[in-house]
Image: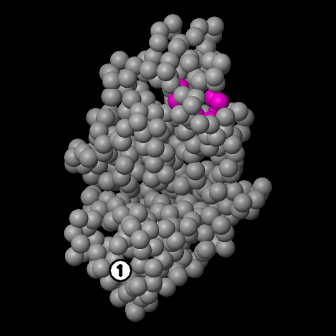
């Protein structure tokens, strides 16, 4: 271990593995270590016995749930947007050859106590029971504007400079009602709060376009895809990739203590009495707990069920977003459902997650609106974890810490953190112009 590396990465969580892969592909010499004897860190994937051990303290799940090894329960479950940045990174690094994806059946939104399919195009807007007759027409016009909008075609801008006009001003031009704005902003553009309304509209429009283009990609009921066997496959795929490019992975390395010079710069990592030197350190918050600050807490419930989420057209996999206003909260709530169809549970079983930014210290009560939508559950586990962000100056001290995972059930925020970290580490902008057809999803 007494070599010098360009970068040492600590922790094999999703973000760390993606960065390790990207840096290896760039030709950097990478050492990747984890104190655990398994991949994934916080974002690991557990079988049934591990799940029981983790939450119940014993490894004896009820027999009627099926075989333990048929379960791959992701601790940080997130769907991927079919044309989103993560899929682009997977293609850019050629990790797609290690993974098999399958389209996600449904994308839904909660409105006035009911679950509705998210309408994403002008055609769907006209059919959607979410809106009354006149609102459908207004929404249709707005969707057509978004679909036709092209950065480099001024005719499509209809005289609006979306770098200056706010999302609120753009929406008011079409006279959309509050409930429509709610599902468009939170379930289509995937904003997690309403601050986007007072920011330039360009990002909002681009996010809506990404949703519609991803939806069109696989002709399924949603814009999302998910790997067969769950996200636990991702860290291992990136570990393989890193090895192909000469990177080194070491699991089960206790302590992993970051070493600093007199100026507070990270210069290496010590484990079991050996120190590996490096120019830069990348890690998750648990490896440098005194260099991060707590910004919140995620509350979640993990459920095992014998049926799909009611009112989701019997979707074997689905996301339901509950916008904050619909619940009188400050943050959205998310339902994630996956099943034996993605090889993450035994036949006939479904895994559902309910997650949100905790606003109280009582997850059972706080998550109730989401759990009530699930119907009968066979087993339920409650869990909370703190969210941290780095508070160091990476330019001065050469270490780069990822932010904790947020409660969203899609990858957009996670990947943005990775892309920003990549630029800070390398000083380059990540080129994600790839041929999207290189990633396909298996059809049923």
Question: 378 or 384: nearer the eye?
Answer: 384
Secondary structure of the residue carrying tag 1 is: helix
Question: 168 or 374: nearer the eye?
Answer: 168
Give the residues drawn in magenta, as a range: 281-288
Residue at (58%, 23%) from the top-left corner? Answer: 266
Q: Residue 326's image quarter?
A: bottom right
Q: Residue furthest bottom?
A: 134
Q: Is residue 286 magenta?
A: yes
Bin the neighbour count of mark 1 within 10 Å (Cα to Cα): few under 14, some 14-19, many 20 and up: many
Q: Position of residue 251 (x, y in %)?
A: 53, 20
Q: Position of residue 56 (x, y in %)?
A: 71, 39
Q: Residue furthest right?
A: 361
Identify residue for label 1: 142
Q: Residue 18's image quarter?
A: top left
Taking the image as shown, residue 86 lies to the left or right of residue 434, namely right
Q: Is residue 38 magenta?
A: no
Above or below: residue 407 compared with residue 292: below
Q: Position of residue 166 (x, y in %)?
A: 45, 73
Question: 196 or 215: nearer the eye?
Answer: 196
């Amino acid at each position: 271990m007494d070599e010098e590396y360009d970068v040492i990465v600590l922790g094999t969580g999703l973000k760390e593995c993606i960065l390790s892969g990207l840096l290896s592909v760039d030709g950097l010499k990478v050492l990747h270590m984890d104190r655990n004897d398994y991949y994934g860190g916080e974002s690991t994937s557990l079988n049934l016995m591990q799940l029981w051990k983790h939450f119940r303290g014993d490894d004896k799940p009820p027999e009627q749930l099926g075989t333990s090894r048929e379960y791959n329960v992701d601790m940080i479950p997130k769907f991927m947007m079919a044309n989103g940045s993560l899929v682009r990174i997977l293609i850019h690094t050629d990790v797609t050859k290690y993974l098999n994806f399958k389209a996600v059946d449904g994308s839904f939104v909660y409105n006035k106590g009911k679950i509705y399919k998210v309408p994403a195009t002008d055609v769907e807007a006209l059919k959607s029971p979410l809106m009354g007759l006149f609102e459908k027409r207004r929404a249709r016009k707005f969707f057509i504007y978004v679909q036709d909008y092209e950065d480099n075609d001024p005719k499509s801008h209809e005289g609006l400079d979306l770098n200056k006009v706010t999302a609120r001003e753009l929406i008011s031009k079409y006279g959309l009602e509050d409930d429509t704005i709610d599902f468009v902003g939170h379930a289509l553009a995937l904003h997690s709060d309403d601050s986007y309304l007072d920011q330039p509209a360009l990002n909002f429009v681009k996010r809506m376009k990404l949703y519609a283009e991803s939806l069109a990609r696989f002709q399924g009921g949603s814009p999302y895809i998910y790997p067969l066997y769950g996200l636990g496959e991702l860290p291992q795929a990136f570990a393989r990739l890193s090895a192909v490019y000469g990177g080194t992975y070491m699991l089960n390395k206790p302590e992993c203590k970051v070493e600093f010079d007199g100026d507070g710069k990270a210069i290496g990592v010590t484990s079991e009495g050996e120190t590996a030197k490096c120019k830069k350190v990348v890690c998750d918050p648990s490896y440098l707990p005194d260099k991060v600050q707590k910004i919140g807490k995620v509350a979640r419930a993990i459920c095992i069920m014998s049926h799909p989420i009611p009112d989701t057209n019997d979707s074997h996999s689905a996301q339901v977003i509950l916008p904050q206003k619909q619940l009188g909260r400050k943050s959205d709530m998310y339902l994630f459902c996956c099943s034996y169809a993605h090889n993450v549970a035994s036949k006939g079983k479904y895994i559902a997650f309910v997650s949100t930014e905790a606003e109280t210290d009582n997850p059972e009560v706080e998550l109730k609106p989401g759990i009530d939508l699930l119907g009968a559950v066979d087993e339920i586990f409650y869990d909370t974890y703190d969210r941290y962000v780095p508070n160091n100056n990476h330019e001065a001290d050469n270490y780069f810490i990822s932010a904790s995972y947020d409660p969203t059930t899609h990858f957009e925020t996670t990947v943005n953190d990775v892309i920003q970290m990549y630029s800070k580490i390398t000083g380059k902008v990540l080129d994600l112009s790839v041929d999207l057809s290189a990633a396909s999803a298996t059809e049923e």
